[in-house]
Image (cartoon, grey):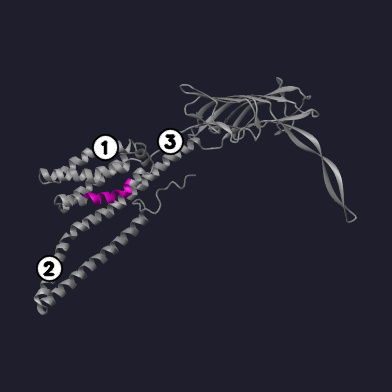
Amino acid sequence: MYSSFQGIPNLPDLTHPNELINFGSNIVQFSWKLALLVLAFGLVMAMITWSNSRQAEPSVAAILQGELERYVLVIQKLPHLGLILVILVGGFFLCSTLANRYHHWEQQKVAQVVTTVSGERLEQAAPQVRYQLEETYTRYRWVDNQQIEEEATRKVDRFLAIAGSQIQLRIDQATDPATRQWLYSVDFEAEYQVINRLSDIQQFFFEVRPPFGYKILQNFQVEKEEKPLVSVNPGDYGFPFRLAPGETTRFRVTYQAQGAPRWVYEPMGQLLSNFRLTVNANFPNADFSGALPTVTQEGERQRELTWIFEGNVSVRNPLGVFTATDPVTNTGILPRLLLLAPAIFLWWILLLNLSLPLSLRDIAIAASIFFACLLTLTYSSRLIDAKLAFALICPILIVLVWGLGKHRQASLAAIICTIAGVALPIFGLLIPYRDRKSTR
């Protein structure tokens, strides 16, 4: 059902062997090409310098000699650059894998919330009072290749408006232990008033159907003036009755049903007159849909919603109640941070290199500290808020970075670079844009 929740597409994942082999072979080929390019460039520079030192003017030889010395200095820095490149590539694979995993965890959380409220809704349609009348129409037929026009009559269905509706609903909520889905247990009771405002029609049909989408339906009963009406044909919920012009009668409909965690009342395009719908939801997080309730009463673990329409009101959307779930907020923040983590690491290393001398060992230690903190942040944020988790990690990060300096001033410089290069960017990325906008 949730096959799309498989991670962020087109990102490498260390848990996929095929992708590892493919990227590893590409890295090896690129490394060989880069090494051959550096070696070839060095040989060419050496040959040019050697030939010009014997034949060219001293000034040209001196210029080439200086360029060669600079090239040698660059070559000496290649181990540092190579180590940083290896760390960036490895960090990218690690961070992309963590981003995929965390995205998958977030989507699983969303899927669990969706599972609790998924399924069809319980929908109760408003009853209809149907009557038939004869209508004259013109029909055509052919006789001896001539078209003949004649009048005929046919019976057509018309509907009488419901004069009043008093509906009382009680909803209890339970959980299906097999699917962890919420279930509604509904106790429905409604009284409908019908007035014959026609002068020449006395035969009517009261048509009311049981709720749509139920799992269990019990004690479905229709009464007219406290007398039970019996359905003659299975599945036929039209009950004939006789009502003289100007007279009034009442119908009562009751049942108990179980179904999906949403109940709605469908007016079927009718004008609601003297309408009152009261829903007693005996569970927390009950919310309304379709139209704003006229009266709302709150309890400790229940809520009563009432819709009252005195005159003729047309309701376009069904009125109903559903269970509101807690919103799944701030999704995608940590995967975004993980994808930007290699760039943050490169910025941090640049600040450290400009502030204090770093050996290959120092760069390796700094990289280990950085990515270990990211790994800790990723898994701890599943249990607590990500901002709180990083606030707890930050002091440990600063204490570990203190050892990168050879003396007090160098250690202070390392701490300042860590705050500016790691702490502030990560905190900035952990704060959602919506929260930053609301604080303005």
Q: Which secondary structure lies at badge 2?
A: helix
Q: Is residue 263 above or below residue 44?
A: above
- Residue in the foreground of this view, choosing between 287 and 272: 272
Given residues 247 and 402, the one toward you in this image is 247
Left or right for 313, reference 393: right
The answer to whether any part of residue 434 appears in the image is yes
- Local crowd at mark 1 within 10 Å, few (<14), some, or many (≥20)? some
Please check the rendered image and state whether residue 430 is part of the magenta-colored stretch, yes or no.
no
List x then y, in percent, for residue 281: 52, 25
Residue 66 is labelled as 2
Tag of residue 55: none
Of marks 2 and 1, which one's residue comes earlier in the chain? 2
Name the residue located 74 percent from the left edge and 30 percent from the top edge.
205
Residue 171 image offset from top left, x and y in percent = 55, 26
Residue type indicated by callout 3: Pro
Q: Is residue 142 left or right of 304 when viewed as pictured?
A: right
- Location of the C terminus by quadrant is top left
Residue that carries the numbered disc 3 in the rendered image: 327
Say if residue 403 shows up in the picture: no
Q: Which mark is residue 391?
A: 1
Which amino acid type corresponds to the residue marked 2 in the rendered image? Gly
Q: Position of residue 349 (x, y in %)?
A: 21, 51
Q: Earlier in the sequence, mark 2 or mark 3?
A: 2
The residue sitting at 12% across, 66% down in the picture is 69
Instruction: Give the residue drawn at x 12%, y 46%.
Output: 410
| Residues rendered magenta in the picture | 337-348
